[in-house]
Structures are given as C-alpha cells and as structure tokens.
Image (spheres, rainbow, N blue to C red):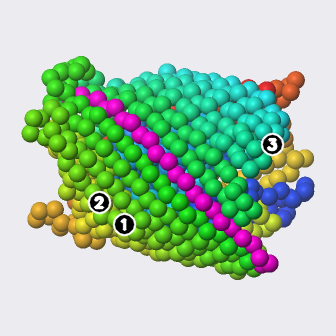
Amino acid sequence: MKCRRMGIAIVLSNFCLSSLCAQTNKLFTDSVHILDTVKVTAFDLQVHREDAPAAVSVINKQQLQLLDNTTLVPIFNTIPGVRMEERSPGSYRLSLRGSLLRSPYGVRNVKMYWNDIPFTDAGGNTYLQLVDASQLQSAEIIKGPASSLYGANTGGAVILHSGRVSTAHTNDFNLGMGTGSYNLFDEHAAWTYTDKNFQSNLQQSHLQNNGCRQQSALRKNIIKWDGSTNISTHEKLNYIFFYSDIFYQTPGGLTLHQLETDTSAYPLAVTQHAAVYNKTFFSGISLESALGKDLDNTTSLMFNHTSFKNPFTNNYEIRHEWNYGGRTNFDYHIKRSSIRFDVSAGVEWLQNHSYITDNGNKGGQIDTLQFKDELYATQYFGFVQTTLQINDTWILQAGLSENQQKVRYRRPSDMLQQSFVNGNTKKMPAPCVSVLYKITKNIHVYALAAKGFSPPALAELHPSNGTFNDSLQPEFGWNFETGFKGNAIGNRLQFDASIYNFSLHDAIVSRGATNDAAYYVNAGSTQQRGFELWLSGIIIHNERSFLSDLQLSNSFSYQPFKFKNYTEGSSVYSGNRLTGVPKFINATTVSANTRKGFFLNILLNNTSSLPLDDANDAFAKPYHLLQSKIGFHFMANKITYEIFMMLDNCLNETYSLGNDLNAYGGRFYNPAPKRNYSVGGNISL
C-alpha cells in the first residue's frame, strides 16, 4: 500500500508540474520573469547549465535557504541521483548514483573541491560535516565518473562555492539564530566587505542539540574566512581558511524490532561513551593568472590538519592527519569566427600522513595500548582536456587523465613491523568523451562515455579492526549516458533528463563482525542502469497579486541497480539488488511568496524500500518525509528582518535516514527524528 501511495505521489507531482507550467501564459501578468540561468564551472566550462555536455546539477543560494541552516541533507536530496544520509546528528554520508556501497566516514567515491581547491584528501576521504550550509553560496554536482579532470572517483564530483560574486562596494552584516526540539540551538554571523579589488567574507557558526535518541548529542563550531584580492590587472588571489571543532555522539544501530518499539541507544555505545571528536584546520589559496591573450593558469595549494578521536564500542582510536597538496591548470583558448577551441592541461598532487593509535576503551577513557600505526598516502594525476564549440550548435569535449595512488604503512608498536610496507595501485587512465547538440535554441541533447576509478580509502585499507588490508584493489568502470536538457515557455520551465549505464568492477563492500568492527572486500561487479528527471517551473509571478510567486520543482530517480557477478563463499548474490540503494526517489519542492512578505516552502521526499544487506534478506521500509518552513520577511530602516518556523517530519514517519549496511546481528537502523520543529530569525544590514 505504501509503495502504491508513493507511486501515485510521483505521478501526481510530475503531472501537476507539467500541467501548471502549461498554464503560465495565463498567470503571468507582469513583465517576463525567468528562472535563474546559472552557470557551471565544472569541466572548466563557463556555460549555462543546459550547455554542459554532462549531468551537472547546481544548488543555488535560494535552494540552500529553503529550510534552516542546520543540515544540507534535505537540500542535496532534492537533486536526482543524489542521496545524502545522516545516521545521527553530524554523521553524514553522500551518495551519487549508488556510490554509498562503501562509506566508513564522510564521503567515498566522490571527489570534492571548495572554490577550486581540493577538499578530498589523498586518503580518499572527505569530512562533509566540516561544511556549514550558512557558509555556502552554491554547489555544483557532477553525476557519474569525472576522473578525466578530477582524479579518483566513480560516483562523481562536488564543487562547493562560498563568497559572493560581486564588483559593487558592499559592507554587509548578517546574524541568525534558531531554536527548537531536542534543545536545538543554531547561531551564525557573517561580515562581508567588497570593493573594486578586494572581497572578504568572515563567518562564524555554532550548532548544538541533544539529538532524538540517547547518546546522539551534537556540538559544532566553525569560523571561516575567505575572499579574493586583485594583485594586478592580470592576477587574482583567492583564499579560504577555516577552523572547525565538532563533537557528536554515535548511538549505534538498532534491529528492526528495536526500531519499532524502542529508539534508545545501543547499550554498549552508552557505556563506552561512543563519539567522534574532530578538530580540523583547513587552508587553501589559488592564483588565477592571465599569461597572455589566449593563455591562463590557475594554481592552488592546500594544507589541513585533523585531530580525530573516536571512542568506539570496541576500541579508542586517535588519529592525527596531515594533508597537503596542489593543483595547476593551464588553459589555452582561441576563437576564430564561429569556432572556439580550448585546451586545458595540468596536474594534481595530494599527500596524506596519518598517525593512528588504537587503545582499549574503558568507559570512554583511554585504556591499554593495542597498536600504533603510521601511514602515508599519495595520489597524483595528470590531465588534458579539449573543448570545441562550433557555430554555437555543437560542443565537443574529450579528456584523459593518468592516475596513481601509493600507500606506505608500518606499525611502530610491533618490533616485527618497523619497516614500511609499500602498496601501489597500477596506473589507471581515465578517458571521457562527450558531445552536446543544440536541437533548438532551448532544447539540447548530449551523450558521453567516461571511465572512472576509485582506489580503496585509508579507512578501508586500515579499518576499525586494526588490520592493514593491502590486497584491496581499486574499483573501476565505464559510464555511458545520454540525455536532454533545456527550457521552455520563456525559460519559465527548465528540464533535465538522462539515462545511463554504469558497470562497476571490483566493487568494494563492507562487512560486519561480532565486535562491531567493519572491514572491506572486493566483491565482483555491479550493473547500475538508471533514469533521472528534473523539472522546475514558475507557476505564478505577479507582483500585484497577493500570491506574488509560486515555484514548483520535482526530481525523480529510478535506480534498479544490481550485483552482476558476486559470490561470498558458497553464497551467490549475483542478480541481487545493490545494497543501500533505493529503487526510486521522488522529491517535490514548492516555494510560495506573497506580496506582503510571507513565504512558505514545502519539501516532500518519497523514498522506496532499499536492501540492507548483500543477501537481500532485510529491507528498509519506504518513507514519505514532509518538511515545511513558513515565515515573514520585511525591511525597516534599511535593515532586512526574517522570522520563520520549520516543521520536520510532518507525517511523523518512523524511518532511518542512514543505515548500517551488512551490520552484524541485524543492527541496520539509525532512527531519524519523529515530528519536530524549530523557530528562528535573521537580520541583514
């Protein structure tokens, strides 16, 4: 019955959007109003979204503010092919087209950049909890392998943008606060200064709550400074620095019976005070230089340090991670008549040096030393990419990168392992070819073929059971994709549809053990064929009517992914559904504004059931997550005020927004909050 209701909701939302947009000519009585024609920078493009010959989605500032600033989860989940999870407050995972198959901490199989500066470390890990929604202006999401330009990934890449793009003189202040269920308190402040040659954004945020379960409290403090300065007429320096201090408790997974009857923490997680302490300093600079009329260069450098402590149910791990690296990209571009030709070439190099100490955990206190490890990880690749635009009708792009990862490991606490053990992956070429043809001015079709790869991360080579598994091999596979995108009705309706076929080989999956420790193995291959559809339209724009703006968008993902060749001992899992991936997701967003300043945002996410183990013996039930934000904004004495109230899980669903896959004893579930609320306000001057 739930699946039937979900299917009806999907059909209705898409039908309503198409039907209502067809009536927009009757509803528009003011001057023509168009949707944002945002530009994408992915693949070194500076084109409108519909001109990119790839599956690229953009989340703008307006979308980031649909709800509150406490989490990116519901906003990212409005993008087709994207699934962001939160197992407990502060514990995030991000999946692009099923890349959630393996994810010990943070983000896996997805490469991330912040303002063109590498954010993913050489060990293949990204701490997504370091990102605060209030400190972003936009995000670009590349779905499907992007290894030809961004190195190790099979799921895709994410490019975060902070800071404003403005040449006007500004001196702005912003302050926001909110409170709500579970002793939630959110506070953020920002100062932005801009003149002709200099831009500075200084931002601070604090977030805390007790969580909806025992042992699920969160405390998060971030201060960030970023901006840019024009060194000369030919050089521009961009910079970003931030320090984060994050603490969140980990309550542990529950069985299905516990999920339905008792959502308290896993008892051992309470007695062992299971939690994560993460203190990170991140710094990055990039220099944009015009070396001549047709030649540009962008060079970036990155350094960060993470102090990571994790009292767990079976141990107490302490890590000190040092990460540094850089990227340089030369871009040669010429334009002759109706032809534009671009060539980009460069290298990226990342280095990770980790000290790992595992001790016994005695009630949340460090106990007897178990081992000390030292690891080095290096990732480097060179890339070249060409782009040819002909008659403003064809865009052809071809790229190739050569990639390698090197790992060195030793155990100083063991007299027999004083020397380093070296493990190198073979060099892996990653080509990509794509073409876009403009059927009409507003309707474009594209096709691409791309190879992606992802070597095992340090958290998989060195899992929580204390072993070093240098037998793990990189995942790799080819993605073939075609789609169409564009706009209609004077750009009041935007659309994007794609169909793809991705075959992943040597897939890495997680295993659970009796002591709660996870480990990872290569498990054959997968077949990931899917379909995605995104529609966004302005239904009403009439500044003279009470309801001045009404916008509706809908995203749909169909993901019937399966294991292709997969056996474990005597068990054959070939043909089983891919673990952790829902077959379909439908997300609908409604945004309404009145002439008097009142606004209402509604998000409805319908997610189908998903398999929780490789054997497909257990499935998470489908859920319907309804969230809303209502508020009022006005201006007085040149100061802008906003007050709002947000209601989360309006339908009071029992569901898990982050599952522990293949968990021992059937403890798959991490219950999400039941119906809850928050209220808050913002002041801008």
Q: Which mark is residue 425?
A: 2
Local crowd at mark 2 within 10 Å, few (<14), some, or many (≥20)?
A: some
Task: Name the image quarter holding residue 475.
Answer: bottom left
Residue segment shown in magenta: 315-338
Q: Which quadrant is home to the N terminus?
A: bottom left
Camera-side residue of 414 and 588: 414
Residue at 23% x, 44% y is 409
Circle nearer the N terminus (3, 1)? 3
Residue at mark 1 = 428
In the picture shown, does residue 680 fall above or below 304? above
Task: Name the image quarter holding residue 203.
Answer: top right
Q: Are marks 2 and 3 in contact (CB under 8 Å)?
A: no
The answer to whether residue 318 is magenta is: yes
The answer to whether residue 485 is magenta is: no
Residue at 56% x, 33% y is 241
Q: Are marks 3 and 1 in contact (CB under 8 Å)?
A: no
Camera-side residue of 586 and 317: 317
Question: How far apart are labels 3 and 1 at the CA level?
Answer: 43 Å
Residue at mark 3 = 167
